[in-house]
Image (cartoon, rainbow, N blue to C red):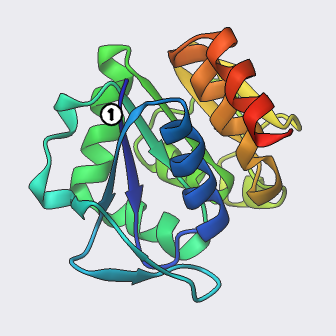
Amino acid sequence: MKTLIAIANGSEEMEAVIIIDTLRRAKFDVTVASLTEGTIEASRGVKLVGDCCWDQINPADFDVLLLPGGFGGTEAFMQHAGVQQAIKDFNAAGKWFGCICAAALALNEAGVLAGKKFTCYPGVEEHLPANVQPVNEIVVVDGKLITSQGPGTAFEFALKVIAECGSPNLAAEVRGGLLL
């Protein structure tokens, strides 16, 4: 499963790394695309380097699009025309896409959350319109949209991506290897 994960300055490092690592353990073909060249500084000061820069890829070549949270990274995703277009395109094409934590704001910015069941980090709902509100669940799947709450739910999010986009058996195998 060709999976595109975006990162930016201010992305939540635990969410990004746990998602990347867990999906790669499932043999997903993961590409980490940074919105800027070189090293990014994640939300807690951890330095991360993408496999490539966003401008070097064509999002249409991927089967899954995932966004980690972190307010700084989320703001970058909200302002990046390419990320915003990719979210819209994945939704319109019926491809798998999702986010964790505050990145629900980037999905809302793209106009894809209205009428969807989703979750996010508690408190993020204050930045969403009254007609677009999350449910309080660890991981939520609505059609081809997968969302989760935050750093502590990143493993469950990644395993749900594996179960939905790969197979439940593969997710169980990876879960066992992680001792979860």
x%, y% of residue 60? Answer: 18, 30
Q: Quick check: 108 left or right of 39?
A: right
Q: Nearer the viewer, residue 163 or 59?
A: 163
Amino acid type at mark 1: Lys
Q: Nearer the viewer, residue 168 or 12?
A: 168
Q: Residue furthest front?
A: 177
Vertical order, 156 against 69 (above or below): above
**Which quarter of the rendering shows the N terminus?**
top left
Q: Residues within 10 Å of mark 1 (few under 14, many from 20)?
A: some
Q: Give the residue drawn at x 25%, y 75%.
A: 36
Vertical order, 127 against 85 (above or below): below
Q: Give the residue drawn at x 18%, y 30%.
A: 61
Vertical order, 49 against 44 (above or below): above
Which corner quadrant of the image does residue 46 belong to? Answer: bottom right
Q: Total label count?
A: 1
Q: Nearer the viewer, residue 167 or 164?
A: 167
Q: Quick check: 57 left or right of 97?
A: left
**Can residue 133 be seen in the rendering of this structure?**
no
Which corner quadrant of the image does residue 167 belong to? Answer: top right
Give the labeled residue for mark 1: 88
x%, y% of residue 44? Answer: 65, 84
Q: Give the residue drawn at x 21%, y 58%.
A: 54
Q: Quick check: 39 left or right of 169?
A: left
Vertical order, 155 against 78 (above or below): above
